[in-house]
Image (tube, coloured by chain):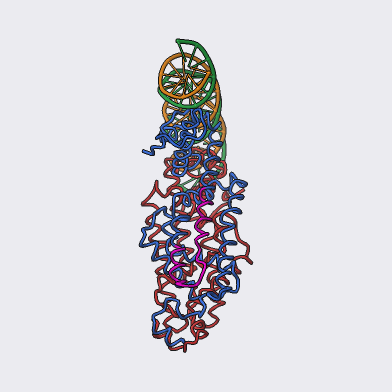
Chain colours: A blue, B red, C orange, D green
Amino acid sequence: MKDRMTPAVRIGGHTQRGQCAKRMSILDAAADVFCRQGFAGASIDEIAAVACVSRQTIYNHYREKETLFVAVVEDVMTRANAMLFSVLSSFPENADDLEDELTAFAVRLNKNCICNHDGKFLRKLVQTEGERYPHLFESWRQQGPGKLTNALSALLARLAHKGALVIDDFDIAARQFVALANADLQMMTLFGETPSDEELDKAARNAVRTFLKAYGRLGADIAGRPPEFAAIAS
Amino acid sequence: MKDRMTPAVRIGGHTQRGQCAKRMSILDAAADVFCRQGFAGASIDEIAAVACVSRQTIYNHYREKETLFVAVVEDVMTRANAMLFSVLSSFPENADDLEDELTAFAVRLNKNCICNHDGKFLRKLVQTEGERYPHLFESWRQQGPGKLTNALSALLARLAHKGALVIDDFDIAARQFVALANADLQMMTLFGETPSDEELDKAARNAVRTFLKAYGRLGADIAGRPPEFAAIAS
DNA sequence: TGTAAACTAGACGCCATTGTCTAACACGTC
DNA sequence: GACGTGTTAGACAATGGCGTCTAGTTTACA
């Protein structure tokens, strides 16, 4: 399992390849075990076993358990941040098919940032070890989720500027968009379950319908109400 | 600290009082330590110290660490459930001052169920130990948060029936109400911070405004629809 | 005041884990 | 083939937690 041992990209000369592969293998295994057992419950021996590596190798790369833990957290955080901003860059630009495009965006957000492996892990970590490593998570909070609201509110502002949305406070609307997108999945994510594609889609659609009912251009028209309503409304 | 040692309510004859006080003191201390350190990280000695009780006393009441843990979790769960349904029973019945009343309700929900001590603890526990004690948390999920949606959707239906709201799917609306109520506090609760009363109030108000924009009768009016559509919608 | 139950403090064995150390092994380079 | 770097397996001491046991003390009630 986890065949990270297969020859990876050769970067420099020397034995870099092997070393790099080992490091990644260890990080992966450690993330897995830390996620399941927490910091206190995780044992270096188990990590070594999962990584198919001797215990001493772990101590060679990361001086002690805590160093390894911090490295794992930083690794997961940078991956998660990169994914978050990649998804953000796919936010719909123009107002055509707004409902469908926003729905697809919400699906991507949920699937790749919140319900995925890294997302679960980070939420778990922040809650359990947040008090023990305040600076570690605080910096992530500001650079990751903290910027999510800002970025999303700017994107919503752009749509509002084009007349596709009617929003008085963009920050609040951004937070509410994220909250609505998670509304149907919150219990699942809390319990660590992974939603199916159908569930993801349905949750996103429900969220966007309500979001557009509240912030859509005509307030109530297109926003997912049956056609009769739109007809009467206009 | 934590002077549970003061003579408590005397229930039966015998030594009940002392024993009962000890049990509660231990449960309180254990909840505190388990919450901070997790199951693996918590030590019986620390719990004993916090409870101002000898270690042996803990082993007398609860045979082993796991028994104590389960007892703590069940204790917190029943408290949290009781509070949840108490808050639910304060849901506004009639449509007068709907915005203010829904806001006050959202504040109560956040303050007493989600952002309070027990709420934080349970979220932490479910995430960290959920896999280890599936049945324990599954039953709570069904009897607590699971019923929250049902109850809330019934309450919303009552309001819709009275023409105060226009809702097509009550379950979805219920989940969205809760999600919106937490939208502004999610980051705080994730990081274990406790929102101030002002923050609670502002968050609730933002949530209810948007909820009513999407589901309020007034929102429908503004959108150019006569009130009688409330009836059609349900 | 006497008795029984509960509580305390501390010692104890047991076990898992951490982090170090050593000797042997694998592999690529000179 | 010699060499250096990285890896491995296992032994090792030290630590700390769990759960048991015992002897002595407190508490509640008759």
Q: Quadrant of residue B153?
A: bottom left
Residue ID at (55%, 57%):
B189
Residue ID at (58%, 50%):
A140
Q: Using the image, determine if residue B63 lies above or below residue B73.
A: above
The percent position of residue A223, horizontal first and vertical second, equals 45, 76
Q: Quadrant of residue A25?
A: top left
Q: Is residue B66 left or right of residue A177?
A: left
Q: Quadrant of residue B159?
A: bottom left
Q: Using the image, determine if residue B98 lies above or below residue A117.
A: below
Q: Is residue B144 left or right of residue A215?
A: left
Nearest the viewer among B44 and B186 is B186
Q: Using the image, determine if residue B94 lies above or below residue B66.
A: below
Q: Is residue A112 visible?
A: yes
The percent position of residue B24, horizontal first and vertical second, equals 51, 50
Residue ID at (42%, 48%):
B70
Q: Is residue B66 magenta?
A: no
Secondary structure mostly seen in the magenta stretch: helix
Q: Is residue A93 magenta?
A: yes
The percent position of residue C22, horizontal first and vertical second, equals 50, 15
Residue ID at (51%, 63%):
A91
Q: Quadrant of the C terminus of chain B?
A: bottom left
Q: Which residues are magenta?
A: A79-106
The percent position of residue C12, horizontal first and vertical second, equals 48, 24
Q: Is residue B18 visible?
A: no
Label count reads 0
Nearest the viewer among D4 and C9 is D4
Q: Using the image, determine if residue B77 lies above or below residue B53.
A: below
